[in-house]
Image (spheres, grey):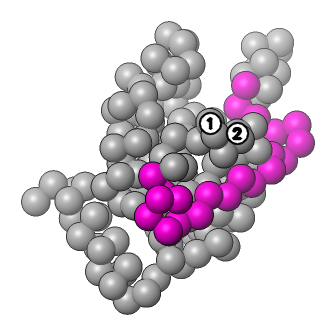
Amino acid sequence: MSELKHILDEITVEKAKGKKIVFTNGCFDILHRGHVTYLQQARELGDLLIVGINSDASVKRLKGQERPVNMLEDRAFVLSALKSVDYVIPFDDDTPLNLIMSIMPDILVKGGDYTIERIIGAQEVLAHGGRVEIIPFVPGKSTSSLIDVIKSL
């Protein structure tokens, strides 16, 4: 059985128990305080937090050829070590829509630079009776700003 199918089966069991499933996604290339705070706040919205993580090829398509700085295996390992994160699921598409449709979370979460109209999967989650939450960024904490600091050294 594939790892994804196994995780989806576990999520189905948890949903049947009445657990609230929260989903978010991102590249999480250089994990920093902003990410950790965001993931903690996302987890507080429900019982299980599932993080969809872009594959290396997907990050390159979205962020450019110099990214990711950390490879998928390393990014997933670090995310999995956080107590707020229950499952980490890699995806290779440019958007997490297929993964969101497979999971159909109760709560879809994105960061403060999004509006509900720009959140992939928002309409689908809302149509299934779920909700969408936007969590504000921690000011001054971003992967891009960290990369800029490193480049200036």
Estimate the x, y position of residue 10 in percent, counting from the top left.
29, 73
Q: Is residue 61 above or below residue 6?
A: above
Queried whether the magenta region covers residue 140, the answer comes back as yes
* Contact check, label 2 and label 1, Cβ < 8 Å: yes
In the picture, residue 54 is in which quadrant? top left
In the picture, residue 141 is in which quadrant? top right
Residue found at x 43% / y 87%: 18
Estimate the x, y position of residue 74 in percent, counting from the top left.
46, 41
Q: Is residue 20 above or below residue 63?
A: below
The dot on residue 114 is 2
Image-based side of 145 in relation to 81, left or right: right
Q: Is residue 105 above or below residue 152?
A: below
Estimate the x, y position of residue 7 in percent, counting from the top left.
29, 64
Image-based side of 121 in relation to 15, left or right: right
Residue found at x 40% / y 61%: 104
How far is the residue under mark 2 from the one under mark 1?
6 Å
Element type where label 1 sits in the image: helix
Comparing 71 with 62, the one in front is 62
Residue found at x 46% / y 82%: 19
Looking at the rendered image, the disc whose residue lies closer to the viewer, 2 or 1, is: 1
Q: How many marks?
A: 2
Element type where label 2 sits in the image: loop
Comparing 49 with 101, the one in front is 101
Please give the range of residues in magenta.
124-144
Going by the numbered disc 1, the residue's amino acid type is Arg
* Pointer 1 residue: 118
Image-based side of 121 in relation to 33, left or right: left
Queried whether the magenta region covers residue 131, the answer comes back as yes
Residue furthest to the right: 139
Residue furthest to the front: 127
